Image (cartoon, rainbow, N blue to C red):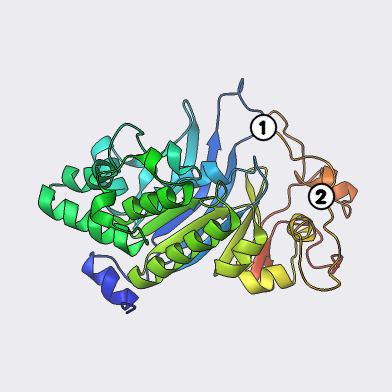
């Protein structure tokens, strides 16, 4: 049975209508000898309770850096400006104790490779109960909670699974364990960083079904990071498109994919394989992504854009309203995209 989201929020002292995540003009720079441009450049996004928000783009666009900032996991010697507010509190200004408490109770992360998330020498039960016991939950209650969560994510014989070690699970089963661990503290927000990339197609569908079902039942906000636009279209309420550390387009999923305003979004869609009868063959985006060693003037996508004009190579386009969404393109209102 699905629980009312406002009741869930109130039960944790959260305001039901307040965003569980607000990234506000976040800029993250490495020392000049490591990067010529910011890894994140004025990134802003929000996630509401019970909402699934997609963050899409090619490798190197800044997706993973953005989502790791939500837990305060920043690169060494990084300089930041802006805010990352989880349940109204800025993660970037928290002390160590407050940050640990936020990670334990307000936000959880599901990483791309489940085997990189767990200690291979420890039993799964230790992994699942560690965070609960650290917050003062008695051992017996923590174990009961772990059994409940393993059952919720579809692990057979959950009590027996507590005694097994990670190598005894397949990749898909271990990702279920990681999802169970992420939900152990009943977080307001789950950040999923390409959680299905290392899995086969059938297992991917099972993991997505588990995530979306548990999110709906618990009223959890979900920030879903992916390079798969078809997957984003299937599960996300809204989508942010990233390129070279910037948000270049955002809007409700249906409108954004039906009528993209930015050539990069259109390019991502055109290179996505389709199974529809008569669908055109995928067309790759020309050129290569901008590396962190490059800081081109103007629009970072201009060198790859078939619609670029001289202005595009000189002026950085602002992210402005177009229709129901926002786009950072000088020609967004010209109807140039097919």
Q: From the viewer's perspective, tell me whether residue 34 is left or right of residue 295.
A: left
Q: From the viewer's perspective, tell me whether residue 318 is left or right of residue 92.
A: right
Question: Which quadrant, please, contains the C terminus?
Answer: bottom right
Q: Position of residue 265 (x, y in %)?
A: 73, 58
> 287 or 94: nearer the eye?
287
Question: Which quadrant, please, contains the N terminus?
Answer: bottom left
Q: Secondary structure at mark 2?
A: loop
How crowded is the residue under tag 2: few (<14 C-alpha within 10 Å), some, or many (20+)? some
How crowded is the residue under tag 1: few (<14 C-alpha within 10 Å), some, or many (20+)? some
Q: Earlier in the sequence, mark 2 or mark 1?
A: 2
**Relative vertical location of residue 213 with respect to residue 172 in this rendering, above or below:** below
Residue at the extreme top? 33
Q: Position of residue 313 (x, y in %)?
A: 83, 43
**Relative vertical location of residue 91 with respect to residue 274 in this rendering, above or below:** above
Provide the residue designation for mark 2.
285
The residue shown at (74%, 66%) is: 260
Is residue 315 visible to us here? yes
Q: Position of residue 66 (x, y in %)?
A: 52, 45
Is residue 84 visible to us here? no
Q: From the viewer's perspective, tell me whether residue 197 is left or right of residue 294.
A: left
The residue shown at (42%, 69%) is: 213
**Relative vertical location of residue 115 with respect to residue 272 in this rendering, above or below:** above
Provide the residue designation for mark 1.
292
Q: Secondary structure at mark 1?
A: loop
**Relative vertical location of residue 38 with respect to residue 4 in this rendering, above or below:** above
């Amino acid at each position: 049975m699905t629980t009312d989201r406002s009741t869930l929020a109130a039960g944790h002292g959260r305001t039901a209508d307040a965003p569980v995540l607000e990234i506000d003009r976040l800029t993250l720079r490495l020392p000049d000898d490591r990067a010529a441009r910011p890894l994140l450049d004025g990134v802003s996004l929000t996630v509401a309770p019970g909402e699934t928000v997609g963050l899409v783009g090619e490798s190197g666009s800044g997706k993973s850096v953005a989502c790791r900032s939500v837990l305060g996991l920043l690169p060494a010697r990084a300089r930041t400006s802006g805010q990352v507010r989880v349940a109204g509190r800025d993660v970037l200004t928290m002390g160590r104790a407050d940050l640990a408490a936020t990670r334990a109770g307000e936000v959880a992360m599901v990483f791309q490779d489940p085997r990189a998330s767990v200690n291979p020498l420890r039993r799964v039960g230790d992994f699942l109960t560690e965070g609960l016991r650290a917050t003062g939950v008695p051992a017996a209650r923590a174990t009961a909670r772990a059994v409940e969560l393993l059952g919720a994510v579809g692990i057979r014989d959950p009590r027996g699974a507590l005694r097994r070690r990670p190598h005894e699970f397949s990749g898909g089963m271990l990702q279920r364990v990681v999802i169970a661990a992420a939900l152990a503290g009943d977080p307001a927000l789950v950040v999923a960083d390409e959680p299905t990339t290392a899995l086969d197609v059938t297992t991917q569908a099972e993991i997505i079904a588990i995530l979306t079902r548990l999110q709906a039942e618990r009223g959890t906000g979900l920030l879903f990071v992916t390079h798969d636009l078809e997957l984003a279209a299937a599960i996300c309420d809204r989508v942010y498109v990233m390129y070279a550390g910037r948000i270049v387009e955002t809007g409700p999923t249906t409108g954004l994919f039906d009528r993209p305003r930015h050539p990069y979004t259109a390019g991502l869609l055109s290179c996505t394989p389709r199974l529809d009868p008569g669908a055109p063959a995928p067309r790759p985006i020309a050129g290569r992504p901008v590396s962190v060693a490059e800081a081109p003037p103007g629009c970072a996508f201009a060198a790859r854009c078939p619609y670029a004009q001289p202005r595009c190579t000189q002026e950085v386009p602002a992210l402005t309203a177009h229709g129901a969404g926002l786009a950072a393109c000088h020609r967004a209102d010209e109807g140039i995209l097919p």
